[in-house]
Amino acid sequence: MRLAALLLLLPLPAIAGAQVLPQSTIAEMATTPLVKLQIAETLRTPPDEASITVGTQSRAPTATAAAAANKEKTERLLATIRRAGLRERDIQTQGIQLSPEYNYVNDPATGRGRQVFNGYVASNSIQLKTRDIPRLTALLDTLTTAGADTVYGPNFSISDPLPLRAEARKRALARGQSEALEYARAQGFSRVSLLSMEEGTSYRGTDVVVTASRVSYSEAAPPAPPPAPLRDGIVAPGQLETGISLNLVYRMER
């Protein structure tokens, strides 16, 4: 019986010792508690560049004829783009396609539908970037007049968002310091020290849709624009947001 009592008592000092450590850690943390903040700052500014994708299409009975016709059409469009003042590095071919075209017709003899070969379709798409936002409407008119069958965009962006992010970061840090100090003083502390910082960036833009009244998406060649100049307001650049998100950890101090 005496041996059994000793075996039962031996683990007790280890258990008692293990209970002391958390009490010491909590007491230490209470003297200098931490403040964790998530601060986000966003700046809004008008875009200074826009991307547009334009395309040409040509149809012919043979693949060779369709490709030749679309090559001539694309070269004419590219010449117009260069005359508009766009830089070579801002003009990029996105894709060239040549494919057969079929019509689906109903056969009266059988009462079933069938595909009828109608020739070939050749297409070419080109992506452009312009920094002349005020003349974007005039550029769209120029492209459709030069033979662009499709126009997608514009997609607005900011050419150099780094200065905006730097300013957003500066404001976020100032806000974090101010808010952490507010928490500290409310608990009887006089100052805070920054322990860690983690950054995440966000960058998104305002969606702007080019109305179909002036941009043709049909497969047929677009009609010639009226001689009168297009009134302002077809394209609204809006504003883009450049934001910084910070996860900050401060220690409260006496």
Image: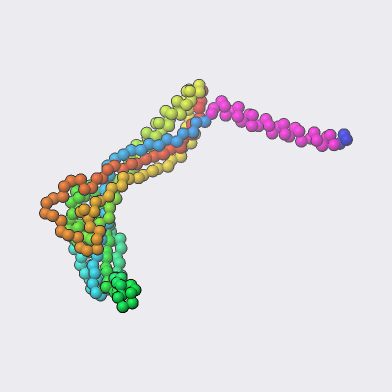
Residue 205 is a magenta residue: no
Please identify the residue farthest to the left as the structure is shown: 227
Residue 9 is a magenta residue: yes
Region in magenta:
4-33
Which residue corresponds to the image point at 27% horizontal and 68% vertical from the top-left? 122
On the picture, is 192 further left or further right than 106? right
Query: What secondary structure is the stretch in magenta mostly built from?
Result: helix
- Residue 23 % position (x, y): 64, 29
Q: Is residue 75 visible?
A: no
Q: Quadrant of residue 240?
A: top left
- Residue 147 % position (x, y): 19, 61
- Residue 91 % position (x, y): 26, 57
On the picture, is 65 further left or further right than 40? left
Q: Quadrant of residue 116?
A: bottom left
Please identify the residue farthest to the top as the structure is shown: 188
Please identify the residue farthest to the bottom as the structure is shown: 109
Which residue corresponds to the image point at 24% horizontal and 63% vertical from the top-left? 219
- Residue 161 % position (x, y): 33, 43
Which residue corresponds to the image point at 30% horizontal and 63% vertical from the top-left? 95
